[in-house]
Amino acid sequence: MCLFVLSADAYECPDTCNCSDITTVICVDTEQIKLPLEVPRRTQTLTLNRNNISVLTERAFSANGTDMELLALSLEHNNIREIKSCAFCGLPRLVSLELSYNRLMVMTPDAFCGLGQLRNLYLNNTLMASGASQLPSALSTDSLCNLQTLDLSGNRLKEIPLSGFGNLNLTTLILTNNSIATLNKHDLQKFNEFKEISVNLSQNPFECKCDKLKEFYDWLKNSRQCVDLETLKCAQPEEKKDIPLVNVCKPQDLGSYVLLGIVLALIGVVFLMVLYLNRRGIKRWLNNIREACRDQMEVYHYRYEQDSDPRLANVAV
């Protein structure tokens, strides 16, 4: 009897939700979702999109304090504004967390506590200004030591909201469609320390003033960490708008020009030395040419005088 009750509880599907199988629960477009949500303990994929969940409370997805076996949790389009401490506690096996298209304004430093197996965190189009300022402390938790993919696209970020990557294991950082004009020296230093990170930076309004862009341009050219380098375009100043960033501030290869100048100078010096060492022979050669030309001109002059004298012409007849 006990086994029967436990089995029934394990497979019970919440009202207003759709359970396609024993491991997947989908609750979409309903106003009746209340947290903490009771779902079958063996659920591995939980989708709670468009349910107007404004606050994620402590242990919001772990009813009765029981750890769940969730691997993927999606909370898109829920108007989430606040994530309280330990909101995801009780999900020790969670691998993917989708928080896109919300309005996050408040995140406590322990917001992502307990997510030791999390690999993918999606926060695109979800951070308000205050939420973006609180994100670095929330990501500094040691619980995210296995995080590999972080999506921060579409958040109007002007700089990277990370204090560092030391506690993370990031391999992919997506920063597309933000308001980043350039990467400062501190950000570039962080990237140089963690060579394994791939960064996406397209659709940002880059300011293409070469004097301010030098360090950023050098990093783009030498690090190969920016995977969408060819798609980066200038937004300012106006005369450089939409020009590919890689073509704007190409440094002149002064070394090649200097080397070419040295080679030409050496050729010139050698040529002058040859002329100097053979000056007597050259002078003799020039004199010979001049004498030959003079003799030839005298022959022509003699023939001309004969042809122009009519008496000589009659004698010839």
Image (cartoon, rainbow, N blue to C red):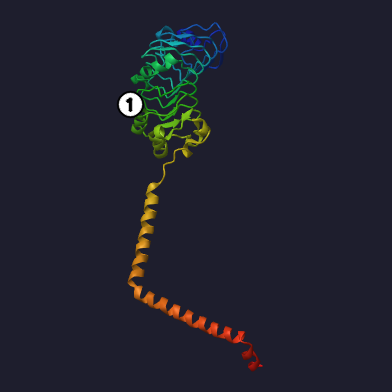
Asked if residue 161 can be seen in this view, the reply is yes
Secondary element at tag 1: loop
Query: Looking at this view, is 263 or 67 the one in front?
Result: 263
Count the numbered circles shown: 1
Q: Residues within 10 Å of mark 1 (few under 14, many from 20)?
A: few
Place residue 191 in its image quadrant: top left
Instruction: Residue type at mark 1: give it.
Output: Gly
Place residue 26 in its image quadrant: top right
Q: Quadrant of the C terminus?
A: bottom right
| Residue drawn where x is 47% and y is 38% of the image | 246
The x and y percentages for residue 13 are: 53, 11
Examine the rendered structure and indicate whether residue 271 appears above or below residue 77.
below
Query: Looking at this view, is 118 or 214 the one in front?
Result: 214
The x and y percentages for residue 164 are: 34, 25
Asked if residue 216 can be seen in this view, the reply is no
Place residue 121 in its image quadrant: top left
Query: Looking at this view, is 82 or 159 the one in front?
Result: 159
The x and y percentages for residue 139 are: 38, 20
| Residue at the disc numbered 1 | 166
The x and y percentages for residue 40 are: 49, 12
